[in-house]
Image: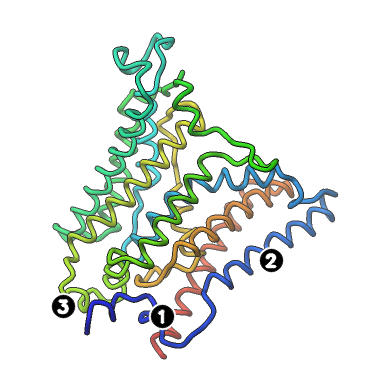
Amino acid sequence: MSTNEIASPTSVIGSKKRLPPEVSILAVLIGIAIVFEILGWIIVGDSFLANKQRLSIIILQVSVIGIIAVGVTQVIITAGVDLSSGSVVGLAAMVAASLAQTSLNPRAVYPSLTDISPIWAILAGLGVGLLAGSVNGFLIARTKIPPFIATLGMMVSARGLAKWYTLGQPVALLDDSFTWLGKSFNIMGFPLPLPVIVFLVVAVIFHIALGYTRYGKFTYAIGANPQAARVSGINIGGHLIKVYAIAGLLSGLAGVMTAARAASGQPGMGVAYELDAIAAAVIGGTSLSGGVGRITGTVIGTIILGVLTSGFTFLKVGAYYQEIIKGMIIVAAVIIDQHRQNKRKKA
């Protein structure tokens, strides 16, 4: 069996031509939006979709989760999991914010490094994410620790480091040249936040990488059949390190964008983001069994989570009920995924 044969997503899914799975996921998104629109007129007496500000808030809320979800999707395709992304966001946000402070702050973390170029803060945040992801990948690839345990350890450690970094104190008074990364731009009368643009660029890059490069073929091959991938000459360990390093890098990027958007760094940033990212990937059609998943589906899944959160808030549904319903949706998505897997095995 050749590398191309085992690595192609279509060979994993099947040879029959069919509509892309994103079509059904998109139909679900449209259906949810229509339901909220109808309920909005009935319960609130207002439109859910005709409010530009609300739509802008929805896409802003999902942008950071979406950046993380792009990396998490690649990890899940390899039949792995990354539980550390939310904690890495918090640590990267703290480190980036500490290098973006102004000299007006009498309690700057690094008094001699205030008012420096924001590029250093950005690079530091990205570096933290890249290092964390590389450690995850090394532990999984070289020591054969299950991904759940390796990334769980990083989740706890990174959160502890985020708290230790400033002894639990927030990092404030950041330079405007850094917080600019969280600003919005008015495009054709619609406020479009920069984090959303970054999310879309990241999604396009990795959609191309997964669908049209050897990196993507190897990623799908490892998740679909690691034994066949090994026989075909794929360096599974080395590739897994790359995948987890990229996931960590994107978590670091999400941390930088979070700090810029909030104009501060706080140890509690990113709590439970990893769960939302995994949920977005699974809702978007990525299989927890590995070998199946697309970035376009993850983007739609991320938007679905954003629409659900905004829609429930719009209808004044309590936060507790929102969490319960979100949990039920995640379980339903996993059940559907298992059903698809069983059908595929029988076929």
* Residue under numbered circle 2: 31
Q: Secondary structure at mark 3?
A: helix
Q: Position of residue 146 (x, y in %)?
A: 24, 61
Classify the position of the C terminus by image quarter.
Answer: bottom left
Distance between the Cα atoms at labels 3 and 1? 21 Å
| Label placed on residue 345 | none
Q: Against 222, is 263 above or below?
A: above
Q: Secondary structure at mark 1?
A: helix
Q: Position of residue 132 (x, y in %)?
A: 27, 44
Residue drawn 36% across and 52% down? Answer: 83
Classify the position of the N terminus by image quarter.
Answer: bottom left
Q: Amino acid at mark 1?
A: Ile
* Residue under numbered circle 1: 13
- C-beta proximity under 8 Å, tags 3 and 2: no
Q: Within 10 Å of the Cα at label 1, are there few (<14), some (14-19), or many (20+) other Cα atoms?
A: some
Judge whether residue 79 can be spotted in this image. Answer: no
Lateral position of residue 132 relative to residue 346, left or right: left
